Amino acid sequence: MQRPATQTVTPDIVRMSGVRFRWRGARAFSLAIDDFALRAKERVLLVGPSGAGKSTFLSLLCGIVTPLAGRLEMLGTDTARLSSAARDHFRAEHFGIVFQMFNLLPYGSILDNVLLPLSFARKRRARAGQNGSIEAEARRLLSSLGLDPAELDGLSTANLSVGQQQRVAAARALIGAPELIVADEPTSALDRDRQNAFLDLLFAEIGAAGSSLIMVSHEEQLGARFDRVLRLEDIAIGERRVAA
Amino acid sequence: MIVPRLALQSLRNRALTASLTVLAIAFSVMLLLGVEKVRTGARQSFADTISGTDLIVGARSGGIQLLLYSVFRIGNATNNITWKSYEDIAKRPEVAWIVPMSLGDSHHGFRVMGTTLDYFKRYKYRHGQQIAFAEGQPFHDLFDAVIGADVAQALRYKVGDPIIVAHGLGSVSFVEHADKPFRVSGILAKTGTPVDRTVHVSLEAIEAIHVDWQSGMPQPGQSVSADEVRRMELAPKAITAALVGLKSKLATFKLQRLINEYRAEPLSAIIPGAALQELWGLVGTAETALAVVSAMVVATALLGMVTMVLTTLNERRREMAILRSVGARPVTILGLLATEAGLLTLAGVVLGALLLYAALGLMQPYIDRTYGLQLAIDAPTRREWLTLGAIVAAGFVAGLLPAMRAYRLSLADGMTVRT
């Protein structure tokens, strides 16, 4: 994909160099990433065998954990210089996250689940409320992701199918148009047709919002739909120490 | 406010365990407050037993002992005071009124007290309340007796029933004043004081039934019949104690000192309130023990709450990971859990207080009737508010324990929850 010349002034969404990280405690898994960058509006599929450190990589990427060494920049900001509170706030403002499973708070209403990130992100809240209320934006997102909000109103989150849950989770990640959508195997619980349908809807919304996407999957055949397919083992070295 | 709402919904999701926890806290708080109520109620009832009396005079003894035997009918007098001493005190210009009491006999375990008609006017309890008659009237005949409410109830006596007074204080007595039976002339209304358990007769009657006695035994061959005794001079020679009312309270200490230094015989005069204080100092240890036990019950309930929050923590790691992923700070999660613990405690405290007042409302008449214990239904005292506040604060602090663990878990879990 050819990028316009102005691209050079837009900072990368994430840039890692010489990053070292190790979990504390019995897990004692360590990960080393020498060089990685995610450009604005880029859609990347990250593949790797289980145990290669995908979750650790995502935790680093989202600033939930901080590297022991190296440099990690998000949107041009060196996150090591941020306080943990500022990092959490940064994540809330700029990242939307979709988990593999168990995405929703089962006791909350569907709308509350979608609106949840806006409680922590003022700019996203303002952006979501640009064309009316934030509730209206949540409903618009839900319906463009193929859920009928009117039909869902009476439904408890716990009564949704896995496919419906993933769409609500996608709506939550997309609301307020954050710069980066991080998806951790969001389609692994869906069959092939539903996978494709889900990705179609996700891509359409990401395109509309101008967000980047990094999606973790073990299904490489999805790669054709992404700008880039990254193998974790190509960019990072994971090492599991056997606990003494 | 989505986050607090979600926290509440999360709590509602665990409604059963949460409500059991609240109930446990409520019961412990109810116990704690209840003990406090009973304690103050008992203290009040004790203090309410005698009112309006400035001094109690008896033979030389400790203040508590004199108070116990003269007012509470507990224990015995070491000695009597002579009628002459009594009259000397009665003649003092400071004295507004004086009521003699003569104790030592009993009727089926209830004490018999010889006194004057003034007793029914002068003896006051519970903020100056006077003794009232439920039935009948004061003693006018020599062998009339006025019985307290408990005596009437326990022995099923009605006005006009004959009663026989036993010598001494045991409930089973082998020496009775059977030759001089009394007649119930009046039954007093319930007071919640030892008056309820007393048989009142005139001082002369006490003299009359002992007229043919010497050294605590009837003298053979010298018996005096009930009719004969009516014609005799029945001036009392000695009494057990006397209640004294003064014209001015300012004279209390002066008269007390005068009586304590009375030369003709060793006497003691006590101020009822001061002697009650002394008594409370004595039973204070038992009170403290009660308070400690109920505090431990509260601590146990709080521990139960911490356990509940801790056990649900594992299921809630997912919830926390989601909150973290949308930007919640670990501190927010810590706060959520501590708030939850605090709210549970608050709910428990409020419920406990409500339960206590409901129970008080229901049980108070029964407790008053049965134990003569007047439990006040009033707003919590400052001390109780402080206690309740301390419990809620302790709940918040106790909630920090699972919250700290959740904090560490949410840091360690990162993006994914391994459950």
Image (cartoon, rainbow, N blue to C red):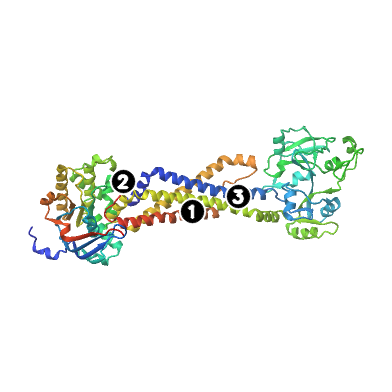
- Residue A32 percent across, percent down from the top left: 21, 63
Q: Are marks 3 and 1 in contact (CB under 8 Å)?
A: no
Q: Residue at x 61, y 48 (%)?
A: B41
Q: CA distance from mark 3 to mark 2?
A: 47 Å
Please provide percent x and percent y for residue B8: 36, 48
Q: Amino acid at mark 2?
A: Gly
Query: In the shown orientation, is residue B225 left or right of residue B123?
Result: right
* Location of residue A229 (image quadrant): bottom left
- Label 3 neighbour load within 10 Å: few <14, some 14-19, many 20+: some
**Image disc number at residue B391:** 1
Question: Is there CB contact under 8 Å for labels 2 and 1?
Answer: no
Q: Nearer the viewer, residue A241 or B230?
A: A241
The amino acid beneath tag 3 is Arg
The total number of labels drawn is 3
The residue at which mark 3 appears reads as B39
Q: Tag 3, which secondary structure?
A: helix
Under circle 2, the secondary element is loop
Chain identity of mark 2: A
